[in-house]
Image: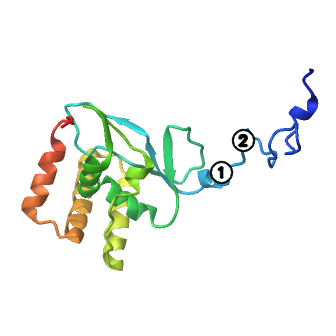
Amino acid sequence: MGFGYDRLKQTGDKGARKKTNNRWFETQDSISYWEDFFQQKILWAETMRIRKENSERFPRFSYTTKPFYTDKTCFIAVGEDLKYVLAFLNSTVGRYQLSQTVSMMDNGGYLMQKIYIEQIKISTLDQKQKIQLIKLVDSLLDISDDELAEGFENQIDTIIFNSFGIEPHEQKYLNNMLAEPLERA
């Protein structure tokens, strides 16, 4: 039995490969979301590791408007209000929620699968607060000064703490808890 050319065709006919749209990025299956890589997006690694002695501001999510493809170990989220969502994901409240739901790999990392990220609660802000939050995110995206960044991050945390009704003593507890090294219970 020989190897026939029909087996290489992507026609979907009997004896041939699945039908595709003959795009350069296709293998066996067409992907309907390929255009998402060209949109603004939130990105995060499936496996996030940290230095055990510094768990502050962990985990982190990134934002970009640049078109590029990720591999199978990274996730992207596209849609509306991404900077608003990014503020919640990178906030103390978001990090706390993740610490309670995400699988810990060992004492130094998280397995950040989509099913966990989808569980993060995001409060609804009025339009004025929402604009203020997005401006703070824009400021963070535009600077490289760590001291300024910390100030903007603290302002974001304050807005988000208030949106959830988290009292100052509870804020202190969350900040102290998240500053501790990751450890399995």
Q: Secondary structure at mark 1?
A: helix
Colour mode of the rendering: rainbow
Q: Position of residue 172 (x, y in %)?
A: 10, 55
Residue 47 showing in the rendered view: yes
Quarter the N terminus occupies:
top right
CB contact under 8 Å: marks 1 and 2 = yes
Q: If the image is split into quadrants, where does the C terminus sit? A: top left
Relative depth, front residue between 170 and 127:
170
Front residue of 138 and 172 = 172
Residue 89: give x, y in percent of width and height: 34, 55
Q: Residue at point 35% right, 46% down?
A: 60
* Kind of element beneath mark 2: loop
Q: Is residue 178 left or right of residue 14?
A: left
Residue labelled with disc 1:
34
At 80% across and 43% down in the image, what residue appears? 18
Q: Is residue 145 above or below residue 138?
A: above
| Label annotation for residue 171 | none
Q: Is the residue marked by circle 1 packed among few (<14), some (14-19), or many (20+) residues within 10 Å?
A: few
Say what amino acid the circle numbered 2 marks.
Phe
* 12 or 170: nearer the viewer: 12
Q: Which residue appears farthest toward the left when viewing the image?
A: 169
Residue depicted at 32% across the width and 79% down the height: 126
Front residue (pair 98, 169): 98
Q: Amino acid at mark 1?
A: Trp
For this view, does 107 lie left or right of residue 174? right
Q: Which mark is residue 25?
A: 2
The quadrant in which residue 108 appears is top left
